[in-house]
Image (tube, rainbow, N blue to C red):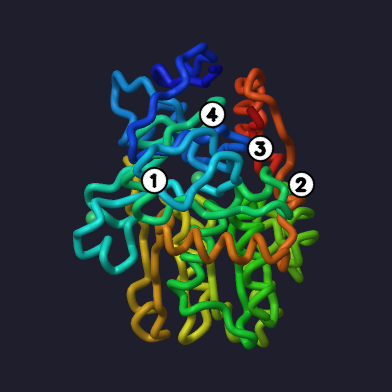
Amino acid sequence: MLAAVYHGPNDLRLEERPIPAISPDDVLLKVTSAGICGTDLRILHGGHRKYPAGTVRVPGHEVVGVIAEVGKNVSGVHAGERYIIAPNWGCGHCRQCVSGHNNRCADYSAIGITVDGAFAEYLRLPGASIAQGNLIPLGKDTDPAVATLVEPFACVVRGQEALGGVRPEDVVLVMGAGPIGIMHIMLARLQGARRVIVSEMLPARLSSALAAGADRAVNPQEDDLAAVIAEESDGQGADVIIVAAPAHAAQEQAIALAAIGGRINFFGGLPKDRPIIQADANAIHYKELRVTGTTACSTSDCWKSAAIVKSGRLDFTPVVSRRFPLTQTQAAFAAAEDRSSLKIVIEP
Ligand SMILES: [Zn+2]
Ligand SMILES: [Zn+2]
């Protein structure tokens, strides 16, 4: 089979490899669609802690596929069925795993992160992940390329749940309008937010944000974001702020822009060698802010996300900017690198 294999920083090679052999507990998936994530770009650039020097591995964790072969110990799964894959699984027995947060497990594993992933024609799904419910039925009605967004959207669902959800009275500010920011806008809208404001520096992404349902899209280099928030919130500030941009200034500004009682989620990580921000602790204290962070998603989040995606209540079609065959993986990564597009999907 053809696979895109990471051999080191900026060294991704298209190679012929044997189709993975499965054990009696595993299934073999024929990959239909695989999304390229910011995490994949970090992996490619050698910046992912689960890809230390010397790692040779197939990345890709936003996966939809068809069952090609079923191990003899696996029940309820049949060849030919379509599934979305929840990529993360934990040890299954620690405190985080048993409380449903297998993404927090110290001993977590993940497709495309700790084992070979989806930028290949076939993928072995280990029995341990199947046992944790990581095979989510897709059905026939959803475009598989759109269904690859179930994993990133699960992270979005998790991010907003950490804020206690978005409520109809909330003025919401989303900082950053990449694929994640766009999905935050759509979920906030679905939950009935009073106003959704977006700050983003790239013009193409500002228009995507408006198309996704934002009431107002602001380029903070051209407009005074604080003045816009004041105007849109009767001078109260934003009730919910989601920082979906890896920027110190955005995280610091979020604390200033929040309303009294506001809720903030630091959704995006900062560069690992520069994680310190200057936060106004008195603003957090006197405004009684709730500042939260979320990372990745649990299997449970993926099931919630899949239910929303499959319902058709949100149309993620415009989030998929371009599709590439596996043979054009290099071009696909270049397109993902070019931040004017949203989600890039590889269709082996
Ligand atoms: Zn991802
Ligand atoms: Zn665990």
Q: Is residue 188 left or right of residue 262?
A: right
Q: Are marks 4 and 2 in contact (CB under 8 Å)?
A: no
Please give the residue where the numbered disc 2 appears in the rendered image.
Answer: 204
What residue is rendered at 42% in x and 24% in y? Answer: 20
63 vs 134: above or below: above
What residue is rendered at 52% in x and 20% in y? Answer: 3
Identify the secondary structure beneath mark 3. strand
Q: Earlier in the sequence, mark 4 or mark 2?
A: 4
91 vs 236: above or below: above
Amino acid on which disc 3 is placed: Ile
Please give the residue where the numbered disc 4 appears in the rendered image.
Answer: 119
Q: Are marks 2 and 3 in contact (CB under 8 Å)?
A: no
**Real-space Cα distance between discs 3 and 4?**
12 Å
Q: Residues within 10 Å of mark 1 (few under 14, many from 20)?
A: some
Amino acid on which disc 4 is placed: Phe
Point out which mark residue 228 bears: none
Identify the secondary structure beneath mark 1. loop
Identify the secondary structure beneath mark 4. loop
Please give the residue where the numbered disc 3 appears in the rendered image.
Answer: 344
Q: Nearer the viewer, mark 1 or mark 2?
A: 1
Q: Nearer the viewer, residue 243 or 147?
A: 147
x%, y% of residue 12?
49, 18
Q: Nearer the viewer, mark 2 or mark 3?
A: 3
